[in-house]
Amino acid sequence: MLFKNLLTATPEVFYGAIFILSLSLVIFSIPSVIHASLKYKLFDISDLHRKNHAANISRLGGLSIVVSFTICTLLFSAIISFEEANFLIVSCIILAGLGLKDDVYGTNTSTKFLLQLIVAAILVFFGDFRLTSLYGVLGINDINYIGGGIFSIILIIFLNNAFNLIDGIDGLAGTIGILVSLCFGICFAMMGQVPYAFIAFALAGAIAGFLKYNWFPAKIFMGDTGALIIGITTAALAIKFIELNKFTGMNRPAFYSAPAIAVSILIVPIFDSLRIFTVRILTRRSPFLGDRNHIHHRLEALGYKPDKIVFMTVILNFVIILATIILQTFGNFLLIFLLIGICMVFNVLISWRLSKQSVK
C-alpha cells in the first residue's frame, strides 16, 4: 500500500528509479557476460561480407538486457497487480530462448517465424495488445476482433524483425532503442498511463546500460536476443499507445493522429525494413537473405564512421518525431505520407552521393 501511494503521488520518482535500476543491473552484469564469452569462446565469428569487426566479439549482450528488463518489470507489476505485463514477460522469455540459440548455434528461418508467430499471438489474444482501428488509414476505420488480431500479429512480427535488421553497426540499434522507448515512456507518462510508462523506462534503462559497452568500438553485441526483446516490447508499446489515444467520441485523446506518431517514433527500423525488402524483391532476391544494402551500410560506404552514422540517424529520427507531434492535427494519412516522403528524400540524397562517389 505504501508503494502504491508513493507511486500515485510521485510517479516521476519511480520512473527515474526504475531507469537507474535497470541501467545498473546491465552495467554490472555485462563484464561477467564478456568474461564467460571469452572463457567458453562464445563469439560472433567474423564475416568479411557483412561484418565490420576484425576481432571476435560476444553476441550475448542481449542476455543482460532481457534479465534486467524482466526483473524490473516483474517488480513493478507485482506492486500494482498489472497482469498484462506477465504476457509481455512470457513473450520476452520465449524470444530470449530463441535469440540465445540463434546467437550461439544458429536457427533456421521457419523455427524463428513459428516462435515469433506464437509470441505475437500470446500478446494479441491473451495480453490484449491488439489494434481495433486503423483510424482511416487506407480508408479503414474500425476492424473486427479477428481482423484486428491478424493485423496486429503481422505488425508485431514485422517490428520484431525490424530492430534486428538495423543492428548492423556499433550502437545503432541500441541508440534508436533508447530513443523509441524514452519517447513512448514520456508519452505514456503525459497520458497518466503509469504501467506502460514504467515498462518503457525499464527498457530504456536496460538498453542505456548495454550501450556503454556497445558504443563504437563495441566490446559486445546485443545479438538476436537483445534485438528481438527491443522489437517485441516497442511493438507492444506502439499498439497500446495507438489504442489508448483512440477517439471514440466519449473521450478526448491526449495525442491526435496516434498511428502517425507511433510510426514517426519507429520510423528508422520501419523505413529501413520496408526499403530493404522492396529492393530485394524487385531484384528477385530472397527478402530474408542478408546483404550490405541497409541505410547504415550505405552511409558507411560514403566514409562515415559508426558513431557519426548513429548521430545522423538519431537526429533525423528525433526531428521527424518532433515535427509529427507538432503537426498531429493534420491527420494520419497526410502525416504518414509526409514521413515516408522525408525518408525517401533522405535515401535519394544518399544514392546521389554514392553515384557521385562512384564516378570519381
Image (tube, rainbow, N blue to C red):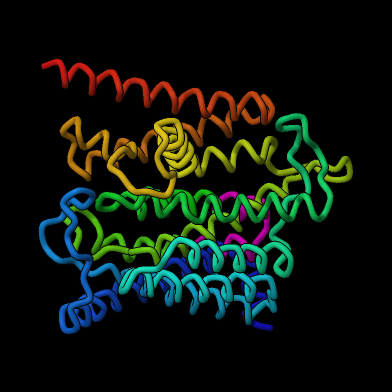
Residue 241 locus on image (x, y percent): 65, 50
Write the residue at 47% across / 64% down.
229
- Disc tally is 0
Write the residue at 62% across / 36% down.
260
**Residue 197 drawn above or below residue 298:** below
Q: Is residue 133 left or right of residue 301?
A: right
Q: Could you tell me what secondary structure mostly forms the magenta stretch?
A: helix
Q: Nearer the viewer, residue 163 or 102?
A: 102
Q: In this view, does 125 lie to the left or right of 267?
A: right
Q: Which of 322 and 298 is in front in this view?
A: 298
Write the residue at 80% across / 37% down.
141
Q: Is residue 91 left or right of residue 258?
A: left
Residue 83 locus on image (x, y percent): 70, 75
Q: Could you tell me which quadrant the N terminus lies in?
A: bottom right
**Residue 42 drawn above or below residue 45:** below
Magenta segment boundaries in residue numbering: 186-201
Residue 258 locus on image (x, y percent): 66, 40
